Amino acid sequence: MSTRRKKIYEGKAKILYEGPEPGTLIQYFKDDATPFNTEKKTILEGKGVINNRISEYFMTRLNTIGVQNHFIKRLNLREQLIRELEIIPLEVVVRNVAAGSLSQRLGLPEGQALPRSIIEFYLKDDKLGDPMVTEEHITAFNWASTQEIDDMMALSLRVNDFLSGAFGAVGITLIDFKVEFGRLWENDFARVILADEISPDSCRLWDAQTNEKLDKDRVHRDLGDVIESYAEVARRLGIMKEMPTVIQGGLH
Ligand code: ADP
Ligand code: MG
Protein backbone atom coordinates (compact mmCIF):
# COMPACT_ATOMS: atom_id res chain seq x y z
CA MET A 1 0.00 0.00 0.00
CA SER A 2 1.40 3.36 -0.99
CA THR A 3 2.00 5.76 1.86
CA ARG A 4 1.99 8.84 -0.40
CA ARG A 5 -1.71 8.48 -1.02
CA LYS A 6 -4.02 10.89 0.68
CA LYS A 7 -6.41 9.31 3.14
CA ILE A 8 -9.88 10.75 2.68
CA TYR A 9 -11.76 8.85 5.37
CA GLU A 10 -11.28 5.96 7.74
CA GLY A 11 -14.39 4.11 8.91
CA LYS A 12 -15.01 0.96 10.86
CA ALA A 13 -14.46 -1.48 8.01
CA LYS A 14 -12.80 0.45 5.21
CA ILE A 15 -10.44 3.28 4.37
CA LEU A 16 -10.99 5.63 1.45
CA TYR A 17 -7.94 7.00 -0.35
CA GLU A 18 -7.70 9.55 -3.10
CA GLY A 19 -7.94 7.79 -6.47
CA PRO A 20 -5.61 8.05 -9.47
CA GLU A 21 -8.00 10.37 -11.33
CA PRO A 22 -10.45 13.02 -10.18
CA GLY A 23 -13.81 11.51 -9.36
CA THR A 24 -12.28 8.21 -8.26
CA LEU A 25 -11.39 6.77 -4.87
CA ILE A 26 -9.60 3.68 -3.64
CA GLN A 27 -11.58 1.65 -1.18
CA TYR A 28 -9.35 -0.38 1.16
CA PHE A 29 -10.99 -3.24 3.07
CA LYS A 30 -9.73 -3.52 6.64
CA ASP A 31 -9.89 -6.52 8.93
CA ASP A 32 -11.92 -6.64 12.10
CA ALA A 33 -10.44 -4.19 14.60
CA THR A 34 -11.18 -6.36 17.62
CA PRO A 35 -8.95 -9.41 17.63
CA PHE A 36 -9.73 -10.76 21.10
CA ASN A 37 -7.98 -13.99 20.20
CA THR A 38 -4.43 -13.11 19.21
CA GLU A 39 -3.57 -16.67 18.17
CA LYS A 40 -6.13 -16.31 15.42
CA LYS A 41 -4.56 -13.13 14.07
CA THR A 42 -3.31 -14.45 10.71
CA ILE A 43 -6.68 -16.03 10.05
CA LEU A 44 -8.44 -12.87 11.15
CA GLU A 45 -6.36 -11.00 8.60
CA GLY A 46 -8.41 -12.54 5.83
CA LYS A 47 -11.64 -10.60 6.37
CA GLY A 48 -10.82 -7.54 4.28
CA VAL A 49 -9.56 -9.72 1.46
CA ILE A 50 -12.72 -11.81 1.41
CA ASN A 51 -15.04 -8.81 1.57
CA ASN A 52 -13.13 -7.08 -1.24
CA ARG A 53 -13.66 -10.12 -3.47
CA ILE A 54 -17.28 -10.77 -2.55
CA SER A 55 -18.17 -7.11 -3.06
CA GLU A 56 -16.39 -7.12 -6.43
CA TYR A 57 -18.33 -10.25 -7.39
CA PHE A 58 -21.76 -8.78 -6.66
CA MET A 59 -21.10 -5.23 -7.86
CA THR A 60 -19.79 -6.56 -11.19
CA ARG A 61 -22.83 -8.75 -11.67
CA LEU A 62 -25.28 -6.09 -10.57
CA ASN A 63 -23.73 -3.80 -13.17
CA THR A 64 -24.42 -6.34 -15.92
CA ILE A 65 -28.12 -6.40 -15.00
CA GLY A 66 -28.29 -2.62 -15.05
CA VAL A 67 -27.95 -1.76 -11.37
CA GLN A 68 -25.36 0.98 -11.69
CA ASN A 69 -22.84 1.10 -8.90
CA HIS A 70 -19.59 2.72 -7.87
CA PHE A 71 -17.33 -0.27 -8.57
CA ILE A 72 -14.75 0.26 -11.33
CA LYS A 73 -12.18 -2.49 -10.79
CA ARG A 74 -10.35 -4.45 -8.15
CA LEU A 75 -6.76 -3.30 -7.75
CA ASN A 76 -5.30 -5.93 -5.44
CA LEU A 77 -6.22 -8.22 -2.53
CA ARG A 78 -7.61 -5.46 -0.36
CA GLU A 79 -8.32 -2.53 -2.64
CA GLN A 80 -10.79 -1.58 -5.31
CA LEU A 81 -11.09 1.48 -7.49
CA ILE A 82 -14.48 3.14 -7.14
CA ARG A 83 -16.30 6.17 -8.46
CA GLU A 84 -16.46 8.96 -5.92
CA LEU A 85 -20.05 9.75 -5.02
CA GLU A 86 -21.85 12.23 -2.83
CA ILE A 87 -23.02 9.71 -0.27
CA ILE A 88 -26.66 9.95 0.83
CA PRO A 89 -26.39 9.75 4.65
CA LEU A 90 -28.75 6.78 4.96
CA GLU A 91 -28.41 3.06 5.40
CA VAL A 92 -31.08 1.26 3.42
CA VAL A 93 -32.00 -2.10 4.94
CA VAL A 94 -34.02 -4.73 3.08
CA ARG A 95 -35.49 -7.55 5.14
CA ASN A 96 -36.92 -10.86 3.95
CA VAL A 97 -36.98 -12.78 7.23
CA ALA A 98 -37.38 -11.44 10.77
CA ALA A 99 -34.13 -11.15 12.74
CA GLY A 100 -32.10 -8.72 14.83
CA SER A 101 -33.65 -5.38 15.73
CA LEU A 102 -36.87 -6.06 13.82
CA SER A 103 -37.51 -9.19 15.87
CA GLN A 104 -36.74 -7.29 19.05
CA ARG A 105 -38.85 -4.23 18.31
CA LEU A 106 -41.90 -6.02 16.95
CA GLY A 107 -41.64 -9.24 18.93
CA LEU A 108 -41.29 -11.43 15.85
CA PRO A 109 -39.54 -14.78 16.24
CA GLU A 110 -36.12 -14.83 14.52
CA GLY A 111 -36.43 -16.79 11.30
CA GLN A 112 -40.09 -15.98 10.64
CA ALA A 113 -40.59 -15.16 6.96
CA LEU A 114 -41.98 -11.65 6.45
CA PRO A 115 -45.23 -11.22 4.47
CA ARG A 116 -43.17 -9.28 1.91
CA SER A 117 -39.76 -7.69 1.68
CA ILE A 118 -39.58 -4.65 3.96
CA ILE A 119 -37.36 -1.63 3.39
CA GLU A 120 -36.14 0.49 6.29
CA PHE A 121 -34.03 3.66 6.43
CA TYR A 122 -31.47 4.46 9.10
CA LEU A 123 -29.57 7.72 9.47
CA LYS A 124 -25.81 7.18 9.11
CA ASP A 125 -24.67 8.66 12.39
CA ASP A 126 -22.44 6.57 14.65
CA LYS A 127 -22.80 8.96 17.59
CA LEU A 128 -26.58 8.52 17.53
CA GLY A 129 -26.34 4.78 16.90
CA ASP A 130 -27.78 5.00 13.37
CA PRO A 131 -31.40 5.72 14.36
CA MET A 132 -34.24 4.51 12.17
CA VAL A 133 -35.92 7.34 10.22
CA THR A 134 -38.99 7.63 8.03
CA GLU A 135 -39.52 9.28 4.66
CA GLU A 136 -40.92 12.25 6.56
CA HIS A 137 -37.61 12.81 8.35
CA ILE A 138 -35.61 12.18 5.18
CA THR A 139 -37.45 14.77 3.11
CA ALA A 140 -37.96 17.30 5.94
CA PHE A 141 -34.22 17.38 6.70
CA ASN A 142 -33.28 17.19 3.02
CA TRP A 143 -31.19 14.04 3.35
CA ALA A 144 -32.80 12.85 0.12
CA SER A 145 -35.66 13.89 -2.16
CA THR A 146 -38.87 11.94 -2.68
CA GLN A 147 -37.58 10.92 -6.11
CA GLU A 148 -34.31 9.72 -4.60
CA ILE A 149 -36.19 7.71 -1.98
CA ASP A 150 -38.19 6.07 -4.77
CA ASP A 151 -34.99 5.34 -6.69
CA MET A 152 -33.27 3.89 -3.62
CA MET A 153 -36.28 1.66 -2.87
CA ALA A 154 -36.55 0.40 -6.45
CA LEU A 155 -32.81 -0.27 -6.67
CA SER A 156 -32.76 -1.97 -3.27
CA LEU A 157 -35.52 -4.35 -4.33
CA ARG A 158 -33.63 -5.22 -7.51
CA VAL A 159 -30.51 -5.84 -5.46
CA ASN A 160 -32.60 -7.98 -3.10
CA ASP A 161 -33.99 -10.08 -5.96
CA PHE A 162 -30.55 -10.58 -7.41
CA LEU A 163 -28.81 -11.37 -4.13
CA SER A 164 -31.62 -13.65 -2.90
CA GLY A 165 -31.30 -15.65 -6.10
CA ALA A 166 -27.52 -15.76 -6.08
CA PHE A 167 -27.31 -16.83 -2.44
CA GLY A 168 -30.32 -19.15 -2.72
CA ALA A 169 -28.61 -21.01 -5.56
CA VAL A 170 -25.73 -21.93 -3.23
CA GLY A 171 -27.87 -22.90 -0.25
CA ILE A 172 -27.78 -19.59 1.61
CA THR A 173 -30.84 -17.64 2.77
CA LEU A 174 -30.55 -13.86 2.52
CA ILE A 175 -32.27 -12.80 5.74
CA ASP A 176 -31.58 -9.07 5.32
CA PHE A 177 -28.90 -6.69 4.10
CA LYS A 178 -27.80 -3.05 4.17
CA VAL A 179 -26.80 -0.88 1.24
CA GLU A 180 -25.78 2.73 0.75
CA PHE A 181 -26.34 5.01 -2.19
CA GLY A 182 -24.69 8.12 -3.52
CA ARG A 183 -25.26 10.82 -6.11
CA LEU A 184 -23.32 10.99 -9.34
CA TRP A 185 -23.63 14.52 -10.65
CA GLU A 186 -23.86 15.12 -14.38
CA ASN A 187 -24.29 18.83 -14.93
CA ASP A 188 -27.38 19.66 -12.88
CA PHE A 189 -28.65 16.11 -12.64
CA ALA A 190 -27.80 13.69 -9.89
CA ARG A 191 -28.20 10.00 -10.55
CA VAL A 192 -28.64 7.64 -7.60
CA ILE A 193 -25.93 4.98 -7.67
CA LEU A 194 -25.31 1.95 -5.45
CA ALA A 195 -22.21 2.47 -3.26
CA ASP A 196 -20.24 1.04 -0.35
CA GLU A 197 -20.01 -2.77 -0.19
CA ILE A 198 -21.97 -5.99 -0.45
CA SER A 199 -20.32 -8.58 1.79
CA PRO A 200 -21.01 -10.80 4.81
CA ASP A 201 -20.43 -7.62 6.86
CA SER A 202 -23.50 -6.03 5.30
CA CYS A 203 -25.70 -9.12 4.82
CA ARG A 204 -27.36 -11.46 7.30
CA LEU A 205 -26.81 -14.90 5.80
CA TRP A 206 -28.06 -18.23 7.11
CA ASP A 207 -27.37 -21.70 5.78
CA ALA A 208 -30.61 -22.72 4.05
CA GLN A 209 -30.49 -26.28 5.42
CA THR A 210 -29.40 -25.75 9.01
CA ASN A 211 -30.10 -22.02 9.61
CA GLU A 212 -26.50 -21.78 10.80
CA LYS A 213 -25.34 -18.15 10.75
CA LEU A 214 -22.69 -17.45 8.09
CA ASP A 215 -22.23 -13.75 8.73
CA LYS A 216 -20.97 -11.34 11.36
CA ASP A 217 -23.75 -12.29 13.74
CA ARG A 218 -21.17 -14.89 14.67
CA VAL A 219 -18.88 -12.15 15.91
CA HIS A 220 -19.81 -12.93 19.50
CA ARG A 221 -18.34 -16.35 19.03
CA ASP A 222 -14.81 -17.29 18.06
CA LEU A 223 -13.37 -14.90 15.48
CA GLY A 224 -11.62 -17.66 13.53
CA ASP A 225 -15.08 -19.14 13.19
CA VAL A 226 -16.37 -15.90 11.69
CA ILE A 227 -13.61 -15.78 9.07
CA GLU A 228 -14.19 -19.43 8.28
CA SER A 229 -17.86 -18.72 7.57
CA TYR A 230 -16.98 -15.68 5.42
CA ALA A 231 -14.62 -17.94 3.46
CA GLU A 232 -17.38 -20.54 3.22
CA VAL A 233 -19.70 -17.94 1.66
CA ALA A 234 -16.96 -17.04 -0.85
CA ARG A 235 -16.30 -20.70 -1.66
CA ARG A 236 -19.97 -21.43 -2.24
CA LEU A 237 -20.21 -18.46 -4.58
CA GLY A 238 -17.32 -20.02 -6.52
CA ILE A 239 -14.79 -17.32 -5.66
CA MET A 240 -11.57 -17.62 -3.70
CA LYS A 241 -11.27 -21.36 -3.99
CA GLU A 242 -7.65 -20.84 -2.98
CA MET A 243 -8.68 -19.02 0.21
CA PRO A 244 -7.67 -21.59 2.86
CA THR A 245 -4.07 -21.70 1.58
CA VAL A 246 -3.90 -17.94 1.24
CA ILE A 247 -5.06 -17.49 4.82
CA GLN A 248 -2.49 -19.97 6.13
CA GLY A 249 0.27 -17.99 4.44
CA GLY A 250 -0.82 -14.76 6.07
CA LEU A 251 -2.02 -11.73 4.15
CA HIS A 252 -0.90 -8.15 3.93
P1 ADP B 1 -18.41 3.62 8.28
O1 ADP B 1 -17.72 3.23 9.53
O2 ADP B 1 -18.77 5.07 8.20
O3 ADP B 1 -19.53 2.69 7.88
P2 ADP B 1 -16.76 2.23 6.36
O4 ADP B 1 -15.65 1.64 7.16
O5 ADP B 1 -17.85 1.35 5.90
O6 ADP B 1 -17.34 3.49 7.11
O7 ADP B 1 -16.07 2.99 5.15
C1 ADP B 1 -16.73 3.30 3.98
C2 ADP B 1 -17.20 4.74 3.97
O8 ADP B 1 -17.12 5.20 2.63
C3 ADP B 1 -18.64 4.89 4.39
O9 ADP B 1 -18.79 6.02 5.20
C4 ADP B 1 -19.40 5.06 3.08
O10 ADP B 1 -20.54 5.87 3.21
C5 ADP B 1 -18.36 5.72 2.19
N1 ADP B 1 -18.49 5.39 0.77
C6 ADP B 1 -18.82 4.20 0.23
N2 ADP B 1 -18.81 4.26 -1.12
C7 ADP B 1 -18.47 5.53 -1.45
C8 ADP B 1 -18.30 6.22 -2.69
N3 ADP B 1 -18.49 5.60 -3.86
N4 ADP B 1 -17.95 7.53 -2.66
C9 ADP B 1 -17.77 8.16 -1.46
N5 ADP B 1 -17.90 7.56 -0.28
C10 ADP B 1 -18.26 6.25 -0.23
MG1 MG C 1 -19.77 1.04 6.68
Image (spheres, rainbow, N blue to C red):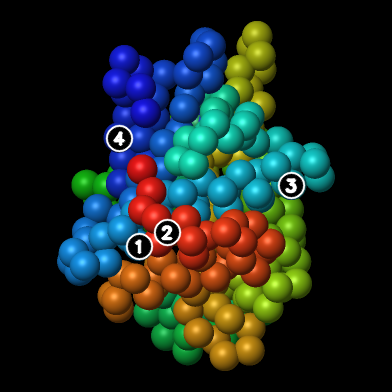
**Image x and y of residue 6, in percent:** 33, 17
Label 1 to label 2: alpha-carbon separation: 6 Å
Q: Earlier in the sequence, mark 3 or mark 1?
A: 1
Q: CA distance from mark 4 to mark 2?
A: 24 Å
Amino acid carrying label 1: it is: Ile
Q: Amino acid at mark 2?
A: Ile
Q: Which quadrant is the C terminus positioned in?
A: top left
Please name the residue shown 65% across and 36% down the image. 69
Estimate the x, y position of residue 142 in percent, counting from the top left. Answer: 46, 32
Q: Quadrant of the N terminus?
A: top left
- Dot 3: few (<14), some (14–19), or many (≥20) neighbours within 10 Å? some
Q: Is residue 110 left or right of residue 172?
A: left
Instruction: First in sequence, mark 2 or 3: give its number.
Output: 3
Looking at the rendered image, the disc whose residue lies closer to the viewer, 2 or 3, is 2
Which residue sits at x=36%, y=53%? 250
Q: Nearer the viewer, residue 65 or 158?
A: 65
Quadrant assignment for ligand 1: top left
Residue placed under numbered mark 3 in the picture = 61
Disc 4 secondary structure class? strand
| Closer to us: 73 or 137 | 73
Question: Which one is earlier in the sequence, the residue at label 4 or at label 2?
Answer: 4
Location of residue 39 by image quarter: bottom left
- Distance between mark 4 and mark 1 Cα atoms: 23 Å
Query: Where is residue 214 drawn, in percent x and y?
Result: 49, 74
For this rendering, which residue is in front, 178 or 9?
9
Mark 1 lies on residue: 43
Depth check, mark 4 against mark 1: the one in front is 1
